[in-house]
Amino acid sequence: MQIRPESTVGSVATAHPLATRVFSRHGIDFCCGGGRSLADACAKGGANLDAVLSELDRELSQEEADIRWDLQPLTALISHLLEDFHKPLREELPRLLAMAHKVVRVHGDKDPETLGGVLDTLIALEAELMPHMEKEELILFPMIASGQGEMAGGPVSVMESEHDVAGDLLRKMSALTQGYTVPEAACNTWRALWVGLEAFENDLHQHIHLENNILFPRALQG
């Protein structure tokens, strides 16, 4: 596809998976905000549209044979989501929570607002994401896999709304940590927590993008 200022962020991310690297660098929301045009997304995030378009050209000129999930069977995409996103999330979130509890316990007095806010946000993410994934696995994904995606408008609407909540929590986390900037005095666990949180955010953005911009629209089309 030819990328234009009026192209939606989600359509670009769908057709060119490597574009998400550029979007991440510029803080452009390509999951929950995938319906915005590039021009609108850049204006909202304070990014220079011409610079973003140039970076997209450079990045995509090196594009390798990444899997186009919009061209794969829906059952294959569901398996990818379960194995490469749901399963790792269930392992990683408790690990991050354990580190956050430890850092708050040992260093909470150094920056109580930031560290306490990070811990509270992680707890909120766990409360949001664990039942969310269970609903997808027990209700929505089986409907889609059995060919009943056209009837899944209600569950899809609920999942998208919950994605928005998770996206808000990720933005809060990034703001609290100043974009995961590690303080100079941070211990190894504190540093590892910030690194882990940034990777977690990147993975969750990809996760939500694949569902919001590829799986759900294709399933609803039948």
Image (cartoon, rainbow, N blue to C red):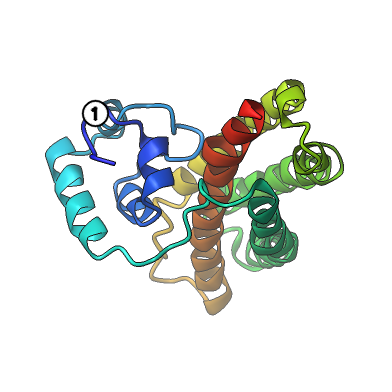
Pick the residue in front: 64 or 156: 64
Q: Position of residue 184 (x, y in %)?
A: 38, 70
Identify the residue position indicated by label 1 in the image: 39
The quadrant in which the C terminus is found is top right
Left or right of 31? Residue 157 is right
Q: Position of residue 160 (x, y in %)?
A: 63, 30
The quadrant in which the N terminus is found is top left
Residue at 71% in and 22% down: 153
Residue at 52% in and 37% down: 213
Q: Position of residue 169 (x, y in %)?
A: 58, 39
- Locate residue 189: give its quadrant: bottom right
- Locate residue 50: give its quadrant: top left
Pick the residue in front: 165 or 105: 165
Pick the residue in front: 74 or 175: 74
Residue at 69% in and 28% down: 156
Q: Is residue 119 above or below residue 53?
A: below
Q: Secondary structure at mark 1?
A: helix
Q: Is residue 130 visible?
A: yes
Left or right of 150? Residue 42 is left
How many neighbours does mark 1 have within 10 angstroms: few (below 14), some (14-19), or many (20 or more)?
A: many
- Looking at the rendered structure, the kind of residue marked 1 is Ala
Left or right of 66? Residue 153 is right
User: From this viewpoint, which residue is outermost toward the bottom?
Assistant: 188
